[in-house]
Amino acid sequence: MSLFDSIGCVSIAVPSIEEALPAYTDGLGLEATSEVITSERGYNLRWIELGRDGKPFLELLEPTSDEEPISRFLEKRGPGVYQVRLFVDDLDAAVAELEGRGMRMTRGEDVPGQARVAFVHPRSTHGVLFEIMERKE
């Protein structure tokens, strides 16, 4: 049985949402379900729906600053998969199990009333950052 119960989203780093979006909407026929949203964390994002209920989804991430991780990712690796979000019911148990399997973990910032997260370092997964999110009740 899998530790994870579903994929939340796949985040894709792009230099420009405006330039990348047609590949997903016109080319793949997917539906962009949001306008561009500016994050306080140094990037813009746009969601692209995949499932019937809006999940899972893709999100295009465009850096707004050269100092942010997405900018550094693009500089080193170019456009591509930046992060995969996986859901679990019990974050603490998942982190303990993953650490027991030798995965390098980093705890995310717990914000009251919002989801708790942890991250599997990309060095443990051949270059992909995994965000492990506790499903809210």
Image (cartoon, helix red, strand yellow):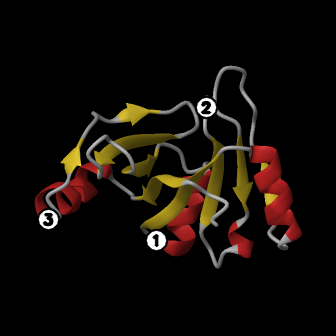
Residue at the extreme top of the image, as rendered: 113
**Location of residue 36 in the rendering, given as x and y in whole percent from the top left corner:** 32, 36
Residue visible at 47% across and 66% down? 81
For the residues marked 2 and 1, what is the alpha-carbon distance in whole angstroms?
33 Å
User: In the image, what residue type sits under mark 3?
Assistant: Gly
Compared with 103, 53 (above or below) is above
Going from the N terminus, do you reach mark 1 or mark 3 first? 3
Q: Nearer the viewer, mark 1 or mark 3?
A: 3
Most foreground residue, 127 or 78: 127
Mark 3, residue position? 27
Compared with 76, 17 (above or below) is above
Going from the N terminus, do you reach mark 3 or mark 2 first? 3
Residue 79, by quadrant, is bottom left
- Quadrant where the C terminus sits is top right
- Quadrant where the N terminus sits is bottom right
**Location of residue 57 in the rendering, given as x and y in whole percent from the top left corner:** 37, 50
**Location of residue 21 in the rendering, given as x and y in whole percent from the top left corner:** 24, 54
Mark 1, residue position? 78
For the residues marked 3 and 2, what is the alpha-carbon distance in whole angstroms?
34 Å
Q: Nearer the viewer, mark 3 or mark 2?
A: 2
Q: Secondary structure at mark 2?
A: loop
Q: Residues within 10 Å of mark 3 (few under 14, many from 20)?
A: few
Mark 2, residue position? 136
Residue visible at 17% across and 55% down? 25
Q: Nearer the viewer, mark 2 or mark 1?
A: 2
For the residues marked 1 and 3, what is the alpha-carbon distance in whole angstroms?
20 Å
Most foreground residue, 19 or 30: 30
Q: Is residue 13 left or right of residue 117?
A: left
Residue visible at 63% across and 65% down? 2
